[in-house]
Image: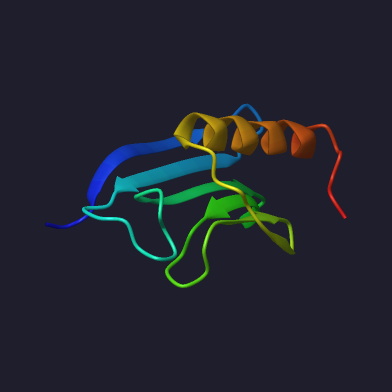
Amino acid sequence: MKAELIKYVKAIDELDNTIEIRIWQLPESAKDRPHGYKYSLVYIAGGEREIGYDNAEGKGDHRHYGKIVKPYEFKGIDRLFEDFYKDIEKYKGGKHES
């Protein structure tokens, strides 16, 4: 059984920036994905990824804020969305992380 795409969203916000979300349900948990999901959430401004949450194979759960990459503690899909959209709002408000 292959991973099943359970959520896909691509939208343009009021600033003409792109939000793209992909979430897959995995057929079984993996060492680096014990929660059973593979995901990629990105916010692209000016052609550059400014915010990103993903768990690329072998890298575990992590987030990108500009050039900064930090581990991310996955606490469920709803929380993932909350954290992602909070970071977008911080970015839009000029509160960039350093």
Q: Residue at x 60, y 40 (%)?
A: 17
Residue at the spot 27% in from the left edge and 52% down from the top edge? 26
Residue 8 coordinates in the image, percent (x, y): 35, 39
Location of the N terminus by quadrant is: bottom left
Count of labels in the image? 0
Q: Is residue 88 left or right of residue 97?
A: left
Can you give x and y, in whole percent of width and height, for residue 61 in the image? 54, 57
- Identity of the residue drawn at 73% across and 57% down: 66
Q: Does residue 18 show up?
A: yes
User: In the displayed structure, would residue 77 be above or below residue 41?
Assistant: above
Q: Is residue 59 above or below residue 36?
A: below
4 with respect to 32 (left or right): left
Q: Of all residues shown, which one is farthest toward the bottom?
A: 58
23 left or right of 27? right
Does residue 16 show up? no
Q: Nearer the viewer, residue 75 or 55?
A: 75
Q: Quadrant of the C terminus?
A: bottom right
Q: To which quarter of the image does residue 7 belong?
A: top left
Describe the colour scheme in one phrase: rainbow
Q: Nearer the viewer, residue 59 or 20?
A: 59
The residue at 40%/55% (across/down) is 34
Name the spot of residue 59 as percent of width and height, x first: 52, 69
| Nearer to me, 1 or 69 | 1
- Is 72 above or below relative to 17? below
